[in-house]
Image: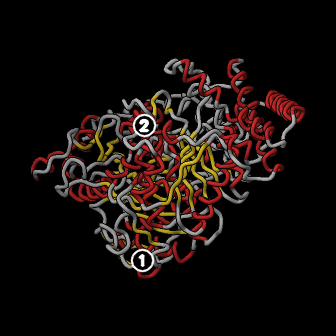
Amino acid sequence: MSVITYRQALHDALRAEMLRDENVLLIGEEIGKFEGSYKITAGLLAEFGQKRVRDTPIAEEGFTGAAVGAAMLGLRPVVEIMTINFSLLALDQIVNHAAKIYGMFGGQATAPIVIRTPGGGGQQLGATHSQNIELYYAFVPGLKVVAPSTPADAKALMLAAIRDDDPVLVLENLALYNTKDEVPDDVAPAEIGKAAIAHPGADITVVAYSRMATVALEAAERLAETEGIDVEVVDLRSLRPLDRETVVASVRKTNCAVVLEDDWLTYGIGAEIAATISDGAFDWLDAPVRRVAMAEVPMPYAKPLEAAAMPSLDDAITAIHQTLDAANRP
Amino acid sequence: MPSKTSRASSRPPRANAKPPRVSDEVALSHYRQMVLIRRFEERAARAYTEAKVGGYCHLNLGEEATVTGLMSAAQGSDYVFTNYREHGYALARGIEPGRVMAELYGRSDGVSRGWGGSMHLFDVNARLMGGYGIVGGQIPLATGAALAIDYRGGDEAVLCLMGDGTTNIGAFHESLNIAALWRLPIVYVVVNNGLGMGTTVEESSAEPELHKRAASYRMASARVDGHDPEAVREAARIALDHARTGKPYLLETISGRLKGHSVVDPATYRSKEEAALLKEADPVAAYAVRLHERDALSDEAIAEIDAEAIATVAAAVDFADASPHPDVSTLFDHTYATPVTNDSRRLPGDALYPAEPKPALETNGARA
């Protein structure tokens, strides 16, 4: 067991898989000589050479599609898209191609690629560099989308994604790269499609993923200490497939729920969670499902405006209090 | 709009003025292939009007010489990626015509098991790596296949086919740049039939001599008469040899599209004169005349080859008609290659959580 950053956990998973399987190669902008915009791939060019760590021109559609084509012939490319915002330039190759290869030809070909890309916000990066648009991919059958919130999950889900025969988008997060936690040295690949109870509790369910799962845990710890409120945190970990059973089972136990999400509220991931709870736990609910989500604006640059747009720990705690009030359980 | 097209000004002289470039035996096999494609496509169009074939259906009519010449140049181990106008390529790669027709019919014996249809033919043994329906979508994929060959040090090459309109999409330029930078074994072939749906090359491309676009990537290129299967074969061989040494290549073939964009398009944007000229330049008829003139093809052989093709296509239709529809129970079989927990197998009318008995309310308001 060692305490490492989320960044190091991702790096270690990539390196381990490259050592294990010579079909694994890395493709992306500035991942080699520059060692990655966020340094996940630092040192890998020196260790594995240009054949396996390929710097690309600025051509997201071209290199993402090339990774899919190489995967169809049996390679296992891991593509870095510098931030999820730029993935829109590769949307056709991800949605119309990677996600369709297996079904469209009747199961004759697979596209085992991994797309690593961070979402984010909160760093004054402005409207086009602060979006959380994982929903676009979580919507599409044929893709798998995982969203680790801890270093241990980052490693375990990355290992699983690389070994999976389907296209997997691994949603990283700018704000999580420097977070530290314990990671077992021999961590096994995670099971894609399973949520985790990150903090067991009896009073209220908080559902979240990626950065907001860490906010949910903070809220749970603070409310336990200061007010004795027993929050159960469900960390989704996988957005497609979605582990509805774990969410519904938790809400049937606690009878109320809050969803925390870094994307926009209208049509967002939280809307799907709320609908799932309505489907699966309607008669168990003591209060409407509450959602805490990004303000619906193009993200402004100015710090006070940006801070106001982003969901915070205080927002989460307020929503938990108000939901417990609505459930008549102050 | 330019009054004179670059196509007309650079069209090579009449095909039948050319000396033979292949043996009579190869020439005859080309001719047989061209006639089979012609008869298959005509029959596919009929099947569409009979509502046996659904969706979109784009035909290689007028491109028979191009298809035949290209596929004749490729090795069996080379990979072919193409777009949605692709039936001829599947036949020329040696796939059973019955399995191709069955795919058009959406049947379980189709090359893609009924999951693809006319636009998405695939056969891994024939190394036909798919017909793709999004214009230009196949280009990055084909480039990646060439990357995989290069990665493993293989001696195969990739043929990536596309239409003339495709050269204006970003994926074309991104991919040619990547292939040139990485020295990938790939030949990009622009099958220039003069029209992207109803828009001419001159209306859509600022450089209408499309092969010249390779210059931006310091890539070798050539333009060849797509009505001449022997010229296409020779040009494609040169291109493939080039590609196998790590120098990607752009080949442009010039042909006509005898019918509309798809079977439902009456092509009213074309003049009668243009249609008449196309008919006159019909590559199948022209090649028959040419082989006849060099005594490689008798009148009897022409009739015999045609009868054979018609019989083959009729058998393909019978095979397709007899093939079972895919069973609805297989609907969820091809979403994921690696089975995954919580994968949805819900049919449209299914409830996520079918109604259960309601929990009993206890007197204090807490619930069971």
Q: Visible in this render: residue B280? A: yes
Q: Position of residue A26 (x, y in %)?
A: 46, 67
For label 2, the crowd category at 10 Å Cα-Cα, with few meaning under 14, some 14 to 19 and many 20 or more, is: many
Circle 1 is placed at which residue position? A44
Kind of residue at badge 2:
Ile
Q: Is residue B109 left or right of residue B5?
A: right
Under circle 1, the secondary element is helix
Q: How is the image coloured?
A: secondary structure
Quadrant for residue A180, please give it. bottom left
Which of the two residues, B77 or A324, is positioned nearer the viewer here?
B77
Q: Give the mark, 1 or 2, whose residue is nearer the N terminus.
A: 1
Do the dots labelled 1 and 2 sit on one chain? yes
Circle 2 is placed at which residue position? A277
How many numbered badges does the structure rendering display? Answer: 2
Q: Is residue B108 above or below residue B271?
A: below
Which of the two residues, B182 or A65, is positioned nearer the viewer here?
B182
Q: Is residue B305 left or right of residue A45?
A: right
Q: Position of residue B234 (x, y in %)?
A: 66, 54
Label 1 marks a residue whose chain is A
Q: Position of residue B47 (x, y in %)?
A: 72, 23
Q: Is residue A262 above or below residue B269?
A: below
Label 2 marks a residue whose chain is A
User: Distance between the Cα atoms at labels 1 and 2?
Assistant: 44 Å
Q: Is residue A176 above or below residue A319?
A: below
Q: Is residue A218 left or right of residue B229?
A: left
Kind of residue at badge 1:
Leu
Query: In which quadrant will I find the N terminus of chain B?
Result: top left
Q: Which residue of the protein is positioned furthest toward the bottom in this rendering?
A: A47
